Amino acid sequence: MRKLILARYVIREHIGPFVFAFFVITLFFLLNLLFRELSRILSKGLPWYVVLEFFLLNMAWIVALAVPMAMLTATLMAFGRFSADSEIAAMEANGISVWAIVRPALFASALLALALVWFNNNVLPDFNHRTRLLASDIARKRPTINIEPGVWYDDVPNFGLLVQELEDSANVTKARNLLLTDYTNREQSRNISARRGYIGLNHARSALVLTLFDGEMQEIDLKKPEEFRRIAFPRHVFTIEVDGLALNRSDSEYRGDREKSAAQMQTEATNNAQEIRDLRQRINTTLALSLLPSLEPAMPIPRDTTIARSLPVLRVQTLSALVALPSDSALSNEAKIKKAKANLFGDMLAQQRQLLNYLERDASMIGGLVRKNQALTVEIEKKYSIPVACIVFVLIGAPLGIMSRRGGLATGGGLSLIFFLLYWTFLVGGEDLADRQIISPFLAMWSANIVVGLAGLYFLWRATYERTTLNLAAMLKWLAREKNKKFSPGSMNNNG
């Protein structure tokens, strides 16, 4: 019963800081995305619900990164408050060890890690796929029609428009003194003028719609300039189709590495590995057939054994096909030999070049498949290593919170920032090294968890048995002092 009460108390103390840290970190990522993408998206004239959809789809990868970070901050704040209020000492006085206090947080982080693994394999790939498609659709969309009074507008192909006065209302743009020039027919000059009109956009048809009043249409046949037509109209609707004005939503079966689950990527990697084996087997077979003499020649051996003995040892098939004696019996044996050698060596060179092209093609395909499998394996490992960071961050956060004896946001945030930088440096650097095939994907994605986890076990042991405190302010002062010593003029002269 006492263990259950302790577990509920420890987990309850984590909920508030976790929710707060999660929203702060999510807000930071969203603001970064907002400043980077909002101006480009708004310049396309997209409706508000498309903009909202774009940011909601990006929430998937933000959640996958924010959850482990929030877990570390919550652990630091919760155990820092326990230590600052002497609750850790009170629990130990009642026979409860530090490990027993940390155990409920580890259990909760393990459940959170399992939920994040499911999220990374079932939700995140689809959201990443839809985000990529929507981003490409937005990139293809033309910006909104931007008409200014008194400025000739010719951004629409085959049309020119001049408006003297514009007035924007709630649903439509009112215009006065319009002049429209139509260049669609190269053999005809067509101008349309109107005293007033409405300018609107038909997103369904991807068109600019002009409703003109009290106007006149003038047409001249360029082949017959003497023919002139002028038509007055009280009202005329003119529609100009504009490619890309509407947002055309696309669909695609193709998925990148980050748009697949671990099972899908594992299946693709297995198929690639089989293709690599087939290509290597084909290379070995090609080399064997090109170097070993054929035992069953396709053509008979030439009767002139003198020529055959004078040529190098080659495949019998190639030899019999190329050194056939010429029909001109006036040639001497020496001339026959020289001609046969020239024919044979020329064909040998062509065959070697063709063989080299085949081998280079297969080797290039193998290299591409190996790099693809390396990238796939990195993504597979990442789908599990980042969720496991929830457990690792509890291991490092609990003892550091106890040793710091402070549960405030400043302490938790400062320590979290240090380990965030350390963790993501390992993760990003490891991914780059793995993609360049310098280290294995497992080491690239799990080295951060291994290093931070071992450090967490060490600090947990110290917090349990040595109970030393961690003064963050003193650490920062020491780092600043060491930095000043390193870059002082005296130290620079000594190093020089």
Image: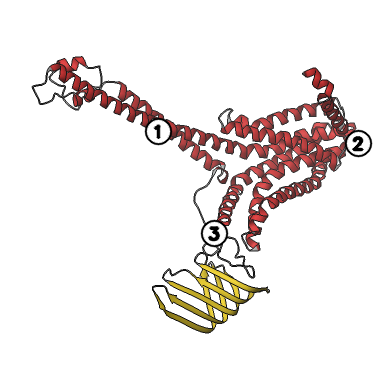
3D distance between C-alphas at marks 3 and 1: 38 Å
Give the colour scheme shown.
secondary structure
In the shown orientation, is residue 21 left or right of residue 241? right
Q: Quadrant of residue 399?
A: top right
Residue in view at x 68 percent, y 50 percent: 36
Q: Tell me the quadrant of the picture where the N terminus can be found.
A: top right
Residue 411 image offset from top left, x and y in percent: 84, 38
The amino acid type found where label 2 is placed reads Ser
Pointer 3 residue: 249
Q: Nearer the viewer, residue 145 or 266?
A: 145
Q: How many marks?
A: 3
Can you say whether 154 is above or below 267 in the image?
below
SS at circle 3? loop
Give the residue pinned by disc 2.
86
Question: Is label 2 in a helix, a strand or a loop?
Answer: loop
Which secondary structure lies at badge 1? helix
Dot 1 alpha-carbon crowd within 10 angstroms: few under 14, some 14 to 19, many 20 or more: few
Is any atom of residue 213 visible in this view?
yes
Question: Reading the chain from its start, which is encountered first: label 2 or label 1?
Answer: 2
Where is residue 442, by image quadrant?
Answer: top right
Q: Residue under circle 1?
A: 361
Disc nearer the start of the sequence (3/2): 2
Amino acid identity at mark 3:
Arg
Please name whichever residue, 203 or 410, is drawn nearer the observer in this view of the structure.
Answer: 203
